[in-house]
Amino acid sequence: MNDTVELLSRLQFASTALYHFIFVPLTLGLSFLLAIMETTYLVTKNEIYKKMVRFWGVLFGINFAMGVATGLTMEFQFGTNWSYYSYYVGDIFGVPLAIEGLMAFFLESTFVGLFFLGWKKLTPKQHCVATWLMAIGTNLSALWILVANGWMQHPVGSVFNTDTMRMELTNFWDVFINQEAQTKFAHVVAGGYVAGAAFIIAISAFYLLKNRSRELAIRSIAIASMFGLVAMIFNAVAGDTAGYVVGEHQPIKVAAMEGVWNDTEAPAPANVFIVSSQSEHKNTVSLTVPYLGGLLVHHSLTRPIKGLNTFRDENRERIKNGQIAWKAFQDVHKGIDKEANLALFKEHQNDFGYGLLLKKYNPQIDEATPEQIEQAVEDSIPNVTVLFTTFHLMVAIGAYFILFMAYWVFKAYRGTIATVPKCILLLSILSLPLPIIAAQLGWVVAEMGRQPWVIQDILPTSVSHSDLTMASVLISLLGFVALYTIMLVVELILMVRTVKTGEKVVE
């Protein structure tokens, strides 16, 4: 029963998060493109740029409203579905979420209001400043969410209190400048900029295909493609940096992403295609490229890549040490030889979380059988097939968009956007969802790659969920999926109607 509740709770949070993240990348990207277009209008005084800002602003507004609506429920799930997680780490995790709500969200929402209502109330310069602050606000919202998530991936600036049985914040600055948070932030927002650029190019390509609003479309493509190319190059660098940081802090995740089961000596090759067997702990089929693995994972040709089978052996020992830590911790709270057991607990404290992996198999962790220990060892290895596939699809989409944006920049530079072949226009339209799909894949890699942990090496997912009935979680899951699907359909209808109306929507 607990396994089912855990799975349903994970599915509920994953579904609401992935629905929400359909809207977030567009919000991040469109907000900055609106600011760039309005700045261009302010400099050139050309009315077409003002019309562009207002037209794309309508689509931004539809997307922003849906993003807010889908995001509000997510934070409540920490209390409803993940109550022990909230108790265990609320002192730390709650801080960036509170800042996001009090500062970034209100800043963002205030200037969104000024953007839409201030055209006749503000001077052109004042309105342009408001648009830039709106864009900055959207990014600050993303920043604080990713600071919280980065701490889950690499918990720093905190300590476990043996008296309260909770994690407590010791240094907020360490949490904020956490490498996991900052590299993830750069990678996520850059992906959002690409999504915004692809969105504008796709709709502009539709207008060129239909021979409508050609001036608006051509100028929009010129701005969006240049912004998108810079963003995509930055995104590739940020993604590589983020991968390196993950390799330093979560090497088991990288081994799964790269499909590496056995230790690979330097210079390590990279797997570009595998058929992996989780139960046999090996790849049954693999296609490799020499030297590339070491360069991607460690930025080195002299460092080996540790394989998942080595992690399995290490995790087995850590689980056994975790049993010792758990038994000592229980004896401390029972008052049994308190000083000696407290010292024993501190000796094995770093492996305490690994002992908790056994709790789903045996409530008396120190009495777990060898078979139960082996089950926990298997749980400690992420799903290789899922991670390898999603990671490489994300990379492939990124490579495609470098070429995609470069093509449109070249056409803009040559002044030949108007003569682009119909097949390219169709391809551009079909490419609209790809950056959002890549972002979704990235979150699958980040979150499934951390499993079985909700807090890496500290708190297993299996002990973090609320004590709910299967029926209650299933009903809420189905309700959220139904509601969010309706909201997505509503957004698509509003978007399509706005696109069909075209620039007349702002006249």
Image (spheres, grey):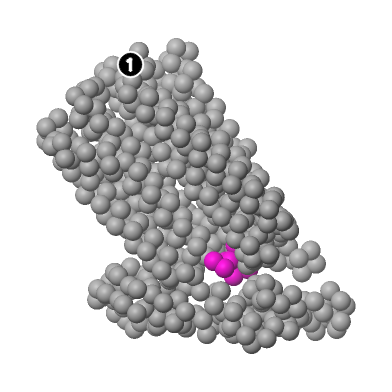
Quarter holding residue 462: bottom right
Q: Is residue 466 magenta?
A: no
Q: Position of residue 482 (x, y in %)?
A: 55, 41
With respect to residue 152, does 329 lie above or below?
below
With respect to residue 20, does 182 lie above or below?
below
With respect to residue 153, does 19 lie above or below?
above
Judge from the rendering whether residue 176 lies leftward or rightward of residue 212; answer left or right.
right
Judge from the rendering whether residue 330 lies leftward or rightward of residue 270; answer left or right.
right
Residue at the limit of the structure toward the right, as seen here: 335
How many other residues sit within 10 Å of disc 1, few (<14), some (14-19) or many (≥20)? few
Badge 1 amino acid:
Lys
Q: Is residue 63 visible?
A: no
| Residue at x-position 49% and y-position 80% | 311
Residue corresponding to mark 1: 504
| Residue at x-position 34% and y-position 83% | 265
| Residue at x-position 35% and y-position 56% | 394
* Count of numbered labels shown in the rendering: 1
Q: Which residues are magenta?
A: 451-458
Q: Is residue 386 visible?
A: yes
With respect to residue 63, does 156 lie above or below?
below
- Main SS, magenta region, reads loop
Q: Position of residue 312 (x, y in %)?
A: 51, 81
Indicate the secondary structure of the residue bearing disc 1.
helix
Q: Position of residue 140 (x, y in %)?
A: 51, 41
Q: Give 192 or 343, whichever is nearer the viewer.
A: 192
Q: Give 72 or 189, whichever is nearer the viewer.
A: 72
Q: Give 363 or 418, whichever is nearer the viewer.
A: 363
Q: Is residue 453 magenta?
A: yes
